[in-house]
């Protein structure tokens, strides 16, 4: 794959990208823009030439999220939109399992992943063979699998879920027991919201598991009016301190609906930046953790992917056929 030379910041590019910069200037320093602008300009042109659409997760940095993305959202929204788009090419600005899910739902499309190394600690925590062993141990118990997994793991499961629909999916099965894989914290959160017995795996998100209840209690002492909004991948003592728990999209909607004066989003760092752009009236208190996988995705890598039309995500057709069913079952319920 060829890597492009650094693109130049010209007066024409400065003028053409000024309106885009205006939107994000509260979170992207002015001295950074000459580095981003040539890529924003070039990517937005290349996208049209290639009939490509850029799907970006809420954890992308603001210059990607507000500069080049066509569709932004949580894992559920990205899966839905991947299934619906008419574009020939999907660039997935997120992590590998998201690109794989897009490919499962749109096998005829070219799905580009700007950096194949962008993984996920949850996806890495379990294999298809592990799921087969669990099925032997708990015969007849349905397996609900978080989308943060490989196609192999999805192929061995009954239905997928995301943090946005997990409780609904578990309850839709009508059983008194389910196996929820692979996030132990999401599984415990689901168990706290339903009477269904939840058997869980010991996986965790390396970003959300680092938050603690103690640090949130300290913030509450410092800012008595603070509203705490947390992602269900966080440990139980963190969720206990939260005023609201939900997927990244639900967290964003909560801020938009409630417009708290001061909010703490207990999740990946770029989320607060991206939401702050839309809500200048809200003060964001920012203890946050970076996802090293999400942060592998950069504008130059998106530009390279669109220029070279690679790296492409491919899934073994036999695995894809079985994995697709589990994602489609989830989408039918959402
Ligand atoms: P959602 O955006 O679906 O809430 O997922 C968060 C996450 O950690 C994705 O990797
Ligand atoms: Fe995986 Fe956590 Fe990073 Fe999301 S934030 S990609 S769950 S490691």
Image: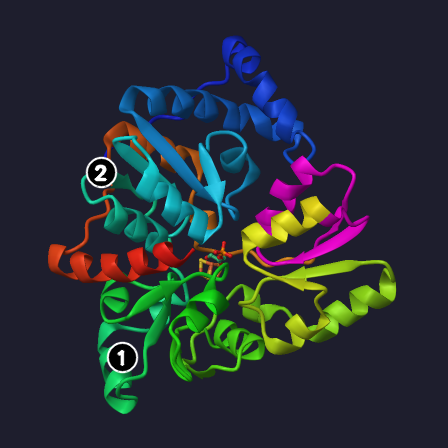
The answer to whether residue 155 is seen in the rendering is yes
Give above or below for 29 relative to 210: above
The disc at residue 285 is none
Quickly name the residue at label 1: 130
- What colour scheme governs how the chains and residues are painted in the rendered image of this protein? rainbow
Q: Which residue is at the front of the view, 160 or 174? A: 174
Q: Is residue 10 magenta?
A: no
- Give the Cα distance between marks 2 and 1: 30 Å
* Residue 42 pos. (x, y %): 40, 21
Given this view, does label 2 or label 1 mark the residue nearer the observer?
A: 2
As drawn, which residue projects farthest toward the front? 174
Q: Residue at x 31, y 60 (%)?
A: 329
Q: Residue at x 62, y 54 (%)?
A: 251
* Residue 309 pos. (x, y %): 24, 33
Q: Residue at x 50, y 59 (%)?
A: 164
- Position of residue 288 in the picture relative to residue 191 (left or right): right
Q: Label 2: state its secondary structure.
A: loop
- Position of residue 139 in the picture relative to residue 219 (left or right): left
Q: Residues within 10 Å of mark 1 (few under 14, many from 20)?
A: few
* Residue 118 pos. (x, y %): 37, 53
- Position of residue 273 in the picture relative to residue 148 (left or right): right
The answer to whether residue 114 is seen in the rendering is no
Q: Label 1: state its secondary structure.
A: helix
Location of the N terminus (image quadrant): top left
The disc at residue 109 is 2
Which stretch is magenta?
A: 258-286
Q: Residue at x 19, y 49 (%)?
A: 314
């Amino acid at each position: 794959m060829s890597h492009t030379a650094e693109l130049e910041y010209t007066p024409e590019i400065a003028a053409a990208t000024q309106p885009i910069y205006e939107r994000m200037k509260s979170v992207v320093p002015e001295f950074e823009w000459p580095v981003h602008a040539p890529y924003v300009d070039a990517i937005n042109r290349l996208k049209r030439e290639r009939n490509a659409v850029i799907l970006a997760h809420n954890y992308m940095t603001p210059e990607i999220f507000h500069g080049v993305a066509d569709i932004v959202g949580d894992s559920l929204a990205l899966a839905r939109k991947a299934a619906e788009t008419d574009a020939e090419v999907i660039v997935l600005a997120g992590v590998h399992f998201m690109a794989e899910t897009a490919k499962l739902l749109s096998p005829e499309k070219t799905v580009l992943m700007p950096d194949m190394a962008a993984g996920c600690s949850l996806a890495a925590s379990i294999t298809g063979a592990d799921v087969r062993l669990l099925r032997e141990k708990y015969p007849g118990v349905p397996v609900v699998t978080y989308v943060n997994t490989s196609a192999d793991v999805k192929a061995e499961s009954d239905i997928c879920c995301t943090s946005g629909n997990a409780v609904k999916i578990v309850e839709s099965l009508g059983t008194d027991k389910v196996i929820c894989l692979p996030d132990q914290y999401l599984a415990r959160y689901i168990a706290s919201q339903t009477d269904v017995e939840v058997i869980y795996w010991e996986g965790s998100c390396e970003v959300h598991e680092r938050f603690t209840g103690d640090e949130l209690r300290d913030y509450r002492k410092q800012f008595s009016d603070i509203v705490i909004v947390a992602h269900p991948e966080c440990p139980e003592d963190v969720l206990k301190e939260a005023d609201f728990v939900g997927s990244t999209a639900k967290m964003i909607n909560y801020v938009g609906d409630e417009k708290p004066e001061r909010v703490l989003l207990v999740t990946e760092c770029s989320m607060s930046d991206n939401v702050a752009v839309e809500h200048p009236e809200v003060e964001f208190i920012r203890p946050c953790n970076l996802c090293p996988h999400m942060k592998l995705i950069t504008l130059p890598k998106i530009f390279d992917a669109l220029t070279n039309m690679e790296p492409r995500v491919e899934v073994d057709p036999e695995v894809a056929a079985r994995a697709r069913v589990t994602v489609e079952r989830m989408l039918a319920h959402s």
